[in-house]
Amino acid sequence: MARYGTEHKHATRQRIIETAGRRFKQHGIDGSGIAVLMADAGLTNGAFYAHFGSKDDLVANVVAGELDAQRATLDALKSSREALETFVREYLSRQHRDLRGDGCPSAALLDEIGRCDTAIRRAYTEGARSIVEVIAAHLAPENPQSARGKALGLYTVMVGTLQLSRALSDEKLSDEVLEEGIHNALTFMH
């Protein structure tokens, strides 16, 4: 039996987390069993427990990783309201609405995360908190704490708008929700 080094194990773990993130966002946490998740990663079921103690452990890691990536994207933006406005427009775009598997974990998984165990909700809370802090820093670079409430509201408007637009079967109404969401988010920012 071959033994793999630490780098290989880390790379395999990351591959599982990344493929599980796409699967969860596309089909939901409850709609994604370990066998399917491991097949997506090109691995056998038996390899799962070499990397995670349980499915909940995987979910917590996926949630933390997805939100950390979203925070890093926001953090990398030029420190200006214009850059944040561009982010809002991209977030509330038709493309983001239609590509669930590559999109925001909040808009895709929030309803399920609310029913998950404490460790998963804790991972989500920490990730969401860090995103709100970065948004606040973009809104008021000189005093981010002063913009915390506005940042929290902006994040809420964005996530809720995207969730609603995805739930609608009427594409025209869904597009209208996105447009109004952009308008409301930009108004909220000023």
Image (tube, helix red, strand yellow):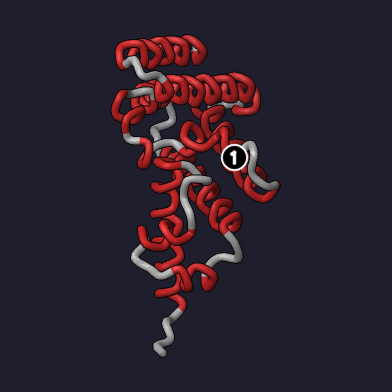
Q: Which quadrant holds the N terminus?
A: bottom left
Viewer-proximal residue among 174 and 82: 174
Q: Of the residues shown, which amino acid type is indicated by label 1?
A: Ile
Q: Is residue 63 left or right of residue 10?
A: right
Residue that sits furthest to the bottom in the current view:
1
- Binning the other alpha carbons within 10 Å of mark 1 as few (below 14), some (14 to 19) or many (20 upward) gives many
Q: Residue 136 location, x and y as percent? A: 56, 27
Viewer-proximal residue among 160 and 85: 160
Residue drawn at x 49%, y 68% as measured from the top left: 48
Q: Residue 114 location, x and y as percent? A: 63, 36
Residue that sits furthest to the right in the current view:
118
The quarter of the displayed image where residue 18 is located: bottom left
Residue drawn at x 44%, y 53% as measured from the top left: 20
Q: Is residue 35 left or right of residue 152?
A: left
The quarter of the displayed image where residue 181 is located: top left
Q: Residue 146 location, x and y as percent? A: 64, 22
Which residue is denoted by mark 1 in the rendering? Answer: 113
- Examine the rendered structure and indicate whether residue 123 appears above or below residue 114: below
Residue drawn at x 46%, y 77% as measured from the top left: 6
**SS category of the residue bearing label 1:** helix
Viewer-proximal residue among 146 and 120: 120
Q: How many marks?
A: 1
- Examine the rendered structure and indicate whether residue 180 appears above or below residue 169: above
Q: Residue 51 location, x and y as percent? A: 52, 68
Residue drawn at x 52%, y 29% as measured from the top left: 135
- Examine the rendered structure and indicate whether residue 6 appears above or below residue 112: below
